[in-house]
Image: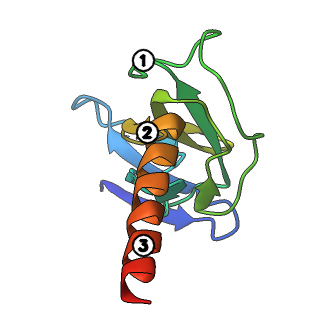
Amino acid sequence: MLGFLEFINKLTGEIIVVGRTASYGSGLYDAFLVKYNSLPGSFTLSADSFNLMWSASTDAKNYSIYMHKRPIIEINDNILLPANNNITAQTYTVPALDDGIYYFIIIAYNKFGNTNSNCIEISIQFPNMEESNNRFLYILMIIISNFLIRY
């Protein structure tokens, strides 16, 4: 008789399958034990202004945020880590950065491994202060002129 039993360890999330199989028609049986460990599930990263947000990754214990000036294809020594590891929240406020294009990726971790999010691009461009000041002065002059003409 062929059969198996499946156990799920509620504390660790491990799935253990125990059973036996026929040994290639010899009349003998082989016992087996298979232990499945669950990697963090897939999840999606998005951004709103200077905030990163991501959906929950099933079985993830914590997250790390990686940033680079080019699209992130793999994690290596050239990738910057603007936040510390072991983040448990699903949001992160991006620190003050200079003008430029930045790429972010989140990695979900548990004791069995990790799963990457999608890579997103955030473009930061501050207005030219000289142009902004000139516009402000021009608008202020119009307001003062209108005030003086009326009174």
Indicate whether 93 appears above or below 102. below
> In 3D space, how far apart are the residues under numbered discs 1 and 2 (Cα atoms)?
29 Å
Tell me which residue sits at (43%, 22%) in the image: 72
> In 3D space, how far apart are the residues under numbered discs 3 and 1 (Cα atoms)?
45 Å
> Disc 1 or 2, which lies upstream in sequence?
1
Looking at the rendered structure, the kind of residue marked 1 is Arg
Question: From the image, which quarter does the N terminus lie in?
Answer: bottom left
Tell me which residue sits at (37%, 53%) in the image: 44
Say which of 67 and 2 sits in front.
Answer: 67
> Disc 3 or 1, which lies upstream in sequence?
1
Mark 2: secondary structure: helix
Mark 3: secondary structure: helix
Tell me which residue sits at (59%, 32%) in the image: 66
> In 3D space, how far apart are the residues under numbered discs 2 and 3 (Cα atoms)?
18 Å
Q: Classify residue 90 by image quadrant.
A: bottom right
Tell me which residue sits at (45%, 79%) in the image: 148
- Image position, residue 79 (x, y; %): 59, 18
Residue 121 seen in the current view: yes
Kindly identify which residue carries mark 2.
Answer: 131
Residue 5 seen in the current view: no
Looking at the rendered structure, the kind of residue marked 3 is Ile
Question: From the image, which quarter does the C terminus lie in?
Answer: bottom left
Kindly identify which residue carries mark 1.
Answer: 70
Kindly identify which residue carries mark 3.
Answer: 143
Q: In this view, does 63 lie to the left or right of 46?
A: right
Q: Residue 128 carries which label?
A: none
